[in-house]
Image: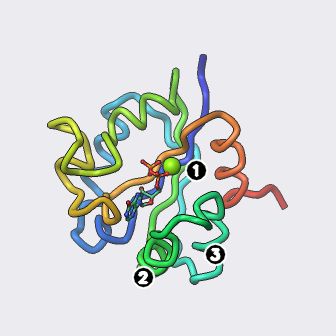
Amino acid sequence: MVEKTLAIIKPDAIKKKLTGKIIQRIEDEGFKISGLKMLHLNKEEAKGFYIIHKDKQFYESLTDFMSSGEIVTMVLEREDAISHWRQVMGATDPALAEPGTLRQMFGSSIERNAAHGSDSPTTAEWEINYFYKKE
Ligand code: IDP
Ligand code: MG
């Protein structure tokens, strides 16, 4: 089934000039990019996006990081987009991610792991709406 997911290139990857490589990989994996925006979130916007993690010990640090520089948000479309994008990214912790995954190749820590992807149809819809709300 063709579905949509929200992908983010995180500030660590933007700073390392990996934006082009990551977008190339997205296209090579057969995704259609149907939305794309570069944004610099403020702290409140980062906290809103990651509200699901508000009780985690890493919430403050994660939202500082995600508001520390520009990000690129994208809506990706493909057959099984949600699970396929998570496969392409690899495990949350780059040290545990499979060889050839984006996080294994480009991530530097469990926090600074280069990319984000929605984890279910419900979160994909919520996350796409967070950045691409129809006015
Ligand atoms: P996911 O991005 O693979 O879905 P989540 O558990 O949803 O992983 O966590 C969201 C983001 O929070 C991660 O991508 C990572 O940037 C950060 N994070 C997750 N676990 C930790 C941790 O234990 N320490 C620091 N940051 C973390
Ligand atoms: Mg997640």
**Could you tell me which secondary element the residue under label 1 belongs to?**
strand
Dot 1 alpha-carbon crowd within 10 angstroms: few under 14, some 14 to 19, many 20 or more: some
**Residue designated by label 2:** 68
**Could you tell me which secondary element the residue under label 2 belongs to?**
loop
Q: CA distance from mark 2 to mark 1?
A: 22 Å
Residue drawn at x 23%, y 41% is 97
Residue drawn at x 58%, y 50% is 35
Q: Is residue 65 left or right of residue 44?
A: left
**Could you tell me which secondary element the residue under label 3 belongs to?**
helix
Disc nearest the viewer among 2 and 1: 2
Between 95 and 87, the one lying in front of the other is 95
Q: Is residue 41 left or right of residue 19?
A: right
**Residue 53, x across and y down, in percent:** 58, 61
**Residue designated by label 1:** 35
**Residue designated by label 3:** 45
The image quadrant in which ligand 1 is located: bottom left
Looking at the image, tell me whether mark 3 or mark 1 is earlier in sequence order: 1
